[in-house]
Image (cartoon, rainbow, N blue to C red):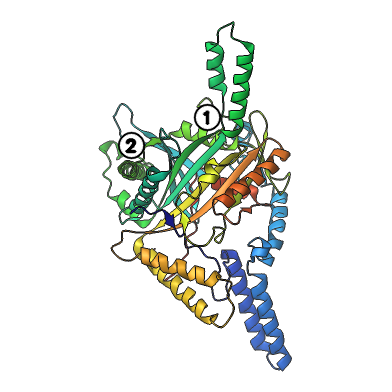
Amino acid sequence: MAVTHVQLGGELQGRSIFGSSRNRLERIGMWSTLAVLVVAQLMVMRWSWTVLLGAVLLATTVFVWSPRPSFGHKSVVGMLAIPLRRRWNRRMKTLDTVGGEAAEAAEGNVPHLPAAVGTLRGFEIELWPGAEHPGRVAVLRQRIHDQTQFTMVLEFRAQQSGVVDGLEGLRNHAGWAKFQAVMARQGSLARHLQPVARIVPFDPADHVQWLIDALPDNAPEILVRSYAELVDGVISEQEQNRTWLTIGVPASREFYAAADRVVLPDDMNEASDRERADARAAVVLATELRRIISAGRANGFSFRELDERRLAAVTRSLQDPDQPLDRLEGADRFSMWLPWIGSESSRYLVIEGSQKRWYTRTAVVPRDGFAAGELPVDMLVPLLTGVNPAVVRTVSTHVTVVPATTARAEARDDLTMDRSAVQQKAKEVSDGTSEAQLTASQRRLQDLQPGSGVHGAEWALAVTIQAPDLEELERAVNAIEEAAAESHISNLDWQDHAHHLAMPLTLPLATGVRRRKKKWLPT
């Protein structure tokens, strides 16, 4: 029987001792403050009023470090720190980036990458050396969450029928689930998958040119005018959709073990240690990517490899919609990065395009951003195809696959905490949040039972919209929020004060999801 609905199993409420879902800085800040207060309390605990004062300070500490939905899923300290950080970034001049071409022409070491991207080093590999079409793929080496990662990009070849529904659509979703499970199995080196969908209004330039060439000189004017009105109406509603798959391979122990087993040709004996290490890494990555392409083909997907110029063209177009995705002219590692102006406003990022400025906003879906309960597997279709009028947008899903043994241990731990939370609130009137989260945890552990072939995944969703002026940007925000509501997304968290940091989430960089680190779980 086909699976038509899924339960994401996200956190509707925090599972920590004090509740709430804190980020790493909030956890460090809260526990550090609590430790200082406890030590101070033990030193001055001589009178009863000091005990009362200490309890009040401890409760206040937990409150100010705990994110609240009413605060935009930020803590009180976080709300105060965000504008302060922006002020600091403005002083350090990291809100603005001059772009690759300006940095290349400037004297000295001028950074051309946005601050959130960090440092990248690129090279190319060949999937089928010696073949007529060797399948050259660009590889980016970068630091992601304190770990080196290799990133490669493939483009999904479009289906003739576009976005499909019904049984054919369910078959595609089932194939994607099986493909992710293959990535999570033992022996797989890929851990981060990032589908990136770019949706832009339909460009009728080619059709108009064909029409001009095909029309006879004596065509009736009323017919030409009527057809022009029809084309204008179609443009306002129709969109073009392109999708890529970004693959992140972390430089883990398994990766280096596989690299050590690579036998290099004799002509590499005189090469430097770095060149030999790069050659071994290239062999391992080519082998892994061939396996990924084969797994995709087995599950109904077809890919096109992106070399350095194609990757540069795609990255450039994702920032500047006036640049066609397939325009390779002038596409290189410098021109792919455009000037970013983040100091103009905290509500948007300005990207200096080839023809005009593009006002850009990015939103992420928080952990409790999806509606509770079972959701249809095609729930994102309204966000991908149902926005009217058409909006220039990029929708990116980050998936970190988790092997079944690790996912099962985490699910068991979460179920224990959720069951305890429900039991503690048994005598209280509940709003249903604890019960819904308990049901999701039970379903997740049931899905992950041994022998099921199901693996775990941690995910994040980001949306970037672009418009040529501020009025159109506001209309785009309203249209996207309506489409998100139809996609069962209850909350879009617009990254105001940090759009220059959030924009890379929708670029093909596979920044991934920061894994929860528990010392008793295998990594």
From the viewer's perspective, is residue 253 above or below residue 307?
A: below
Which residue is drawn at the image coordinates 57% and 47% (left, top)?
463
Which residue is drawn at the image coordinates 66% and 73% (left, top)?
63
Which residue is drawn at the image coordinates 60% and 24% (left, top)?
230
Residue 494 percent coordinates (x, y): 64, 52
SS at badge 2:
loop
Badge 1 or badge 2: first in the primary sequence: 2
Figure quadrant of the N terminus: bottom left
SS at badge 1:
loop
Q: Residues within 10 Å of mark 2 (few under 14, many from 20)?
A: many
**Residue 15 visible, this angle:** no
Q: Label 1 vs label 2: CA separation? A: 22 Å
Residue 350 percent coordinates (x, y): 68, 40
Residue topped by disc 2: 127
Judge by depth and name the residue closer to the eye, 427 or 112. Answer: 427
Residue topped by disc 1: 331
- Give the residue type at disc 2: Leu
Residue 358 percent coordinates (x, y): 66, 36
Q: Residues within 10 Å of mark 1 (few under 14, many from 20)?
A: many
